[in-house]
Image (cartoon, helix red, strand yellow):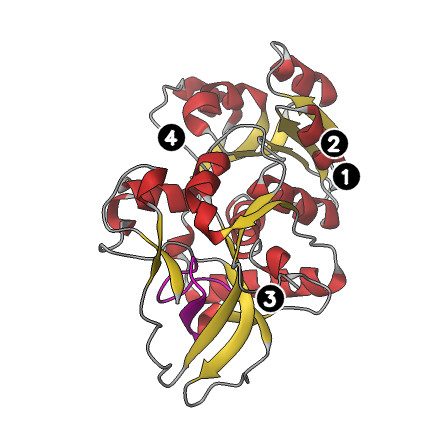
Amino acid sequence: MKAISVSHFGGPEVLTLQEVPDPRHPEAGEVLIRVKAAGVNPYDTYMRSGTYGARNPTLPFVPGSDAAGVVESTGAGVDLKPGDRVYTTGTLTGAYAELTLCDRTQVHALPPRVSYAQGASVYVPYATAYRALFQLSSARPGETVLIHGASGGVGLAATQFASAAGMRIIGTAGSEEGLDAIRREGAQAAVNHRTADYQQQILDLTKGTGVDVLLEMLANVNLGNDLKLLARRGRIVVIGSRGNVEINPREIMLREASIFGVYLWGLLPGEAAEIHAAIQAGLHSQTLRPVVAAEIPLASAPDAHRRVMEPGAHGKIILIMERNSTG
């Protein structure tokens, strides 16, 4: 099969398209999937570069956790059959490949109205968004949520979840296209974070009281100022950071604020089951509608890794297997 293989850590250029052996036949409780589409996440770039700490994979490896496709074959005791449409929430052998082996717990039914490209957009963005909003910050209907970088994959997922739950949403983006995307997905207000006074605009939208919950995608740049945008007992959830940051703890004390960090790989089984149930319900009801920004060939994975880290995102970047239809 064709797959993207990483034989040494480095920049996007280390992602090379190769002919590699097919995964082994699935054992009991395992599923082999013919991949139609694979999602590209920022954390994929950290693994590729070897900067993801304890989560760095053993070389060589095939990147990716989010895929969508059809069941190719199954091991004993699996309640799926060849041809079933599915999406993954992790894999055993990597998603950037024509075939991927998964544990049954990593495979979920893909509703008929959801395309393969959308299915590959589900897990990391929507699980992260749900974890941040409901399991960590305990966001409630009627509260005001500020989503920094709301036009990206996680941001749009969080906007859809928060809108369906009856929250007031303020989203930020760095382009008119991104601001339009935020409004389409349910934000009541969209603010360009490239403007000099964007923080004051946010405070004005809350009549000076601040926001109840803030989802932060770039904490090393924004966290110090984020604290000044919080209401009393406000909560910040750090979803992304690319370095260190200096903050004034007095801002936390004055508001009796809380700061959480998301780490999907530490989920307890019950927390994961809750997330998957919420995602499945949202996909079936169409309150969750994955937004695909670009579908590009598997061979262009290096370009995808460059683009996923650039500002101005407005949806998910998807790798398409050239021999397959996205459906």
Give the Cα separation between the discs numbered 1 and 4: 29 Å
Residue type, mark 3 in image: Ala
Residue plotted at (42% across, 68% down): 100
Give the Cα separation between the discs numbered 3 and 1: 25 Å
- Dot label at residue 242: 4
Mark closest to the chain's N terminus, 3 or 1: 1
Instruction: Indicate which label's residue lies in the foreground, 3 or 1.
Output: 1
- Dot label at residue 106: none
Give the Cα separation between the discs numbered 3 and 4: 31 Å
Residue type, mark 4 in image: Arg
Magenta stretch, overall SS: loop
Is 274 colored magenta in this rendering? no
In the picture of the structure, the residue carrying the numbered disc 1 is 184
Mark closest to the chain's N terminus, 3 or 2: 2
For the residue labelled by badge 3, is the local secondary structure a helix, a strand or a loop? Answer: helix
Region in magenta: 88-103
Residue contact at pointers 3 and 1, CB within 8 angstroms:
no
For the residue labelled by badge 4, is the local secondary structure a helix, a strand or a loop? Answer: loop
Mark closest to the chain's N terminus, 3 or 4: 4
Q: Position of residue 177 (x, y in %)?
A: 70, 29
Q: How many callouts does the rendering have?
A: 4
In the picture of the structure, the residue carrying the numbered disc 3 is 277
Residue contact at pointers 1 and 2, CB within 8 angstroms:
yes
Q: Is residue 278 left or right of residue 222?
A: right
